[in-house]
Image: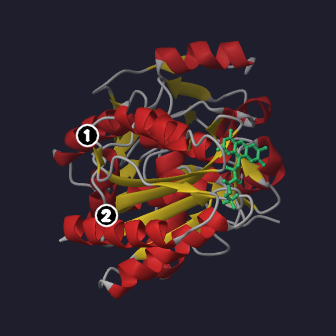
Amino acid sequence: MHCVRKVTDDIYWIGANDKRLHLFENIHPIEDGVSYNSYVLLDEKTVLLDAADWSVGKQFIENLEFVLNGRPLDYMIINHMEPDHCASMEEVLLRHPETKVISTAKAFKMMEQFGFCNLGETITVKEGDEMNFGKHTFTFISAPMVHWPEVMVTFDTTDGVLFSADAFGSFKSLDGKLFADEVDFDRDWIDEARRYYTNIVGKYGPQVMNLLKKAEGIDIKIICPLHGLVWRKGIGYFIDKHIKWATYEPEEKGVLIAYASMYGNTENAAQILAAKLCEKGVTNIRMYDVSKTHVSYLISDAFKYSHIALLSVTYTNDLYPPMEEFIRDMQRLSLQNRTFAIVENGTWAPQANKVMCKMIGEMKNMTLLNEKLSMLSSVKEDTYEALDALADTIAESLK
Ligand SMILES: Cc1cc2nc3c(=O)[nH]c(=O)nc-3n(C[C@H](O)[C@H](O)[C@H](O)COP(=O)(O)O)c2cc1C
């Protein structure tokens, strides 16, 4: 049975939720699922904006046919051709051979590469092109690398609706809600929106800022992304978050403590550091065991907090692999402007400090608060005092 919602009088959300998928992009855990959003404009012409993943294809097609209610589908706009949105487009075209597909030249090339064939009549658009569908005029804005190079976004100049592709998206299935003002976003959604942005689009901050600059000139009333909630109220709040993330500015003054420990002694040091920080009035702390926490959560909080304390054991003359993965991921996603404190542990020849220093040094605008805090196997009086002093240094730099 169909399951759709109205966005405006003429625009419907016809997407679907996937609560069964464990790993988004086969890498990021999605405990709360994800939605694949697709939209239809009913005007003098009918227009489908993006499709959906194959896993929800049946629901998506049922929704599409319900909304069309026997009308032909005149156009299908593909803003982003990644298979989690486009895999079902061929099914749409088999049912609607009358449909003309509108997209960028690069997207058509990539559709061919992926084998999304039988496209029929196509219309290639570029930055600034406009198309009228009756009451509504759409303009197309290129947004390269706002996830993939072929991406564009579509702006409905009539109603001020921005179809933003993967920009302004989020993990989490919608479960009946559609609009951000229907949920407690700060309580229930912001962490997953940040985890989505930072891990999926995080590397492309400058490109996101380019898109936001272009968006400054247009009066956006509604944002319709391809995953997550639709924004029609308080859009500025979400745009501000994206500006912070895209410019690699921390959202909050606080400390992310990430530790790697096999037998619990480095963990003990992490707990002592946290306790000392709290004693000194620094309570905005989030602590993770890197072996137990998927790196996508660590990345999300690395984008959130101003300070990052890394405490790691030495492992076969090198850094402990999950800690290395975390720092490598921060590098890959171009994280910048953070303040680090590091602690190493080793039993016969500690090496973790050297590797962590080198990796942090390879990133842009990172400050390292301490040169070396090395512990041998377990926390003794000297390490305890050194951790206390490190907490002082961190607290001071947070002022
Ligand atoms: C497989 C393995 C390899 C290790 N390699 C080194 C090493 O190369 N150099 C060193 O000083 N300690 C090494 N250690 C010791 C760890 O760093 C040790 O777990 C640590 O000193 C104690 O901290 P923990 O209780 O937090 O695990 C190794 C331990 C294991 C289990």
> Residue 379: where, in percent of width, then height?
56, 68
Local crowd size for mark 2, using a 10 Å CA cut-off: few (<14), some (14–19), many (≥20): some
At horizontal 56% and vertical 38% (from top left) the residue drawn is 351
Label 1 close to label 2 by CB (< 8 Å) = no
Q: Quadrant of residue 128?
A: top left
Disc assigned to residue 365:
1
For residue 157, above or below residue 139? below
At horizontal 50% and vertical 25% (from top left) the residue drawn is 103
Is residue 52 visible to the viewer in this orientation of the structure? no
Q: Quadrant of the N terminus?
A: bottom right
Is residue 111 visible to the viewer in this orientation of the structure? yes
- Give whichever of discs 1 and 2 has the lower sequence position: 2
Please tell me which residue lies in front, 48 or 229: 229
Amino acid found under the numbered disc labelled 2? Glu
Secondary element type, mark 1: loop
Q: Quadrant of the C terminus?
A: bottom left
